Image: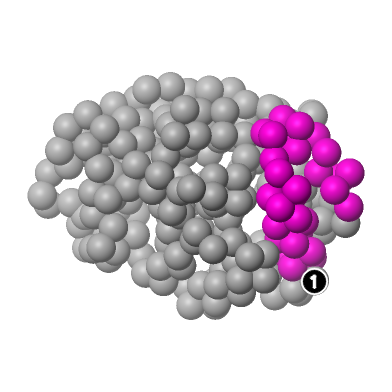
Amino acid sequence: MTGLQLGGLTARYELSALQVSQLEEILRTLEADEHAPTAVRSATQALDIHLADSLVALELDQIATATTIADIGAGAGFPGLPLAVALPAARVALVESQRRKCDFLMGIASTAGVENTTVVCARAEDWREGLESNDTVVARALAPQPVVLEYAAPLLRPGGSLVDWRGRRDADEEGAALRAAEILGLELAEIRRVEPFEGATDRHVHVFSKVAATPERFPRRAGMARKRPLGG
């Protein structure tokens, strides 16, 4: 792994030598760990599929200016870990409910020297310390959008934003998400088509703003958002 392979990202996001080194270490660790919780471990593939896809959110003001970020359903650490590298002044919580994945996240963050992350080993619905404490919540390939909205809304401070990574647009799902958002105190701010790497198609980030207080009945108990999704 050399800095040249990260050259495109380095220029696009004005990354320092230290940040490039940390991202390289993330790729090395991912490739070396056969138990890493992702199907994409090859450094060559992960450079685009994981790193570039995560860092594209830096093009949003809601991400670039955030000081507290929560990555819900963090999995193998994307998008939260690369964003933590790119935004060293921000505090990034990697929220993941599965202990095996939590252990992986703690290990890869430590190995890469990413000190502004905290691994929260809990379901998003059960993370009481995170309620109304985040400038931005991010989610990537987590759940149907109305479910993601319900996970995120209670964790956002007033005026905060959810950034939700999506693929091809789905009118039915987007309609359900708008109805759920209204219940939760959220409002759709933007759906932006993004091209995180050359040849990427059907990639979008959906941005919702918290414009009103989320009703006190949220978060519902764990599992209810998926079992009985809002907006249907």
Quadrant for the N terminus, please: bottom right
Residue at position x 43%, y 53% from top? 91
Q: Is residue 141 visible?
A: no
Residue 112 location, x and y as percent? 67, 65
Queried whether the magenta region covers residue 22, the answer comes back as yes
Query: Looking at the picture, how far across and down is residue 9, in whole percent?
Result: 74, 37
Furthest toward the left, the residue is 216
In the image, is residue 16 above or below residue 36? Answer: above
Q: Position of 214 compared to 170: left or right?
A: left
The residue at the point 12 percent across, 52 percent down is: 217
Q: Judge by depth and name the residue closer to the eye, 60 or 95.
A: 60
Q: Quadrant of the C terminus?
A: top left
Q: Quadrant of residue 188?
A: top left
The magenta stretch is 2-31
Using residue 118 as the reference point, say whether residue 202 is left or right of it.
Answer: right
Identify the image's colour scheme: rainbow, by chain, secondary structure or one colour: one colour
Q: Dot 1: within a 10 Å radius of its alpha carbon, few (fewer than 14), some, or many (20 or more) residues?
A: few
Tell me which residue sits at (62%, 26%) in the image: 194
Q: Nearer the viewer, residue 20 or 152?
A: 20
Task: Write down the residue under mark 1.
Answer: 32
Q: Is residue 161 visible?
A: yes
Principal SS element in the magenta part? helix
Task: Provide residue 134's location: percent of width, then percent of height.
Answer: 32, 47
